[in-house]
Amino acid sequence: MSFLDLIFPPRCGGCGRDGVAWCERCAASVQPVPVTTLNGTPLVAAGRFDGPLQAAIHSYKYRPRPALASVLAEPLRRAVAAANLDLAALTYIPLHSLRRRERGFNQAERLAAALAGPLGLPVIGGLSRVRPTPTQVGLSQPERQANMVAAFAWTPSTPPPDRLGLVDDVCTTGATLEAGADAVARAGGSIGAFVVLARAQTLPALAVTSPGQSACP
Ligand SMILES: [Zn+2]
């Protein structure tokens, strides 16, 4: 039992049941979703952004619940392994330093760290938020895209490699992931796949296609 478990006794992040960070019933409720693409790049998610997974991601993001990172990473690890991606390393969407300081951790960085070992991939941090962005909640797709333009830069002097897996917790419209991919491309690397815990159903149909299809159902 860790120090944090003493302060925050384990409660299921999905349903609130006492005793475990993520109960079997909630784990069983996460239905695999097919791999889609976001502007031509594969998008792998552990499940849809609803029900217990949505509740757990919310708990995970706003409360210091480190145990949730590893249990939520497991269905995502399975989804990534099943997608047979050829990735060189993982990287993650950063928080602005002010928000990182407030929250004390970056949930996407923690998720990337939890995935790295089981997938046998290194984590290369390099994206920085170069300006604070207002919260995306409540914004339309065009507003989100405008909000995220040039929000990130790859800051290390070593350029990013090709075939990075870009990790984030939720893909809502794809605007954040696309802005991260733009920054990696500007620095000379490329994204091999977007890797997210949950995919919202609000993704624009034209941007998201299943392999071999022209549009999302
Ligand atoms: Zn539960």
Image (cartoon, rainbow, N blue to C red):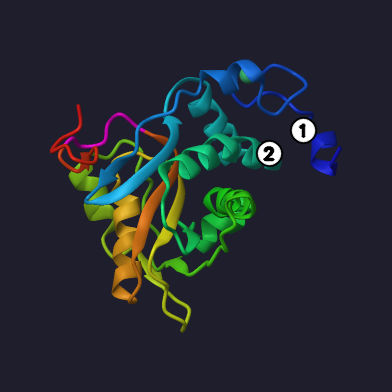
Name the residue that disc number 2 marks.
Answer: 65
Q: Relative to 204, is 55 above or below?
A: above
Q: Is residue 203 magenta?
A: yes
- Cβ atoms at labels 1 and 2 below 8 Å apart: yes
CA distance separating discs 1 and 2: 8 Å
Q: Amino acid at mark 1?
A: Phe
The circle on residue 60 is none
Q: Relative to 209, is 56 above or below?
A: above
Q: Is residue 54 magenta?
A: no
Write down the region rendered in magenta.
200-205
Name the residue that disc number 1 marks.
Answer: 8
Name the quadrant of the N terminus: top right
Q: Nearer the viewer, residue 92 or 151?
A: 92
Crowdedness near tag 2: few (<14), some (14–19) or many (≥20) residues, C-alpha within 10 Å: many
Q: Nearer the viewer, residue 31 or 120?
A: 120
**In which of the image's four quarters is ligand 1 placed?**
top right
Q: Amino acid at mark 2?
A: Arg
Residue pictured at 29% horizontal, 64% vertical: 182
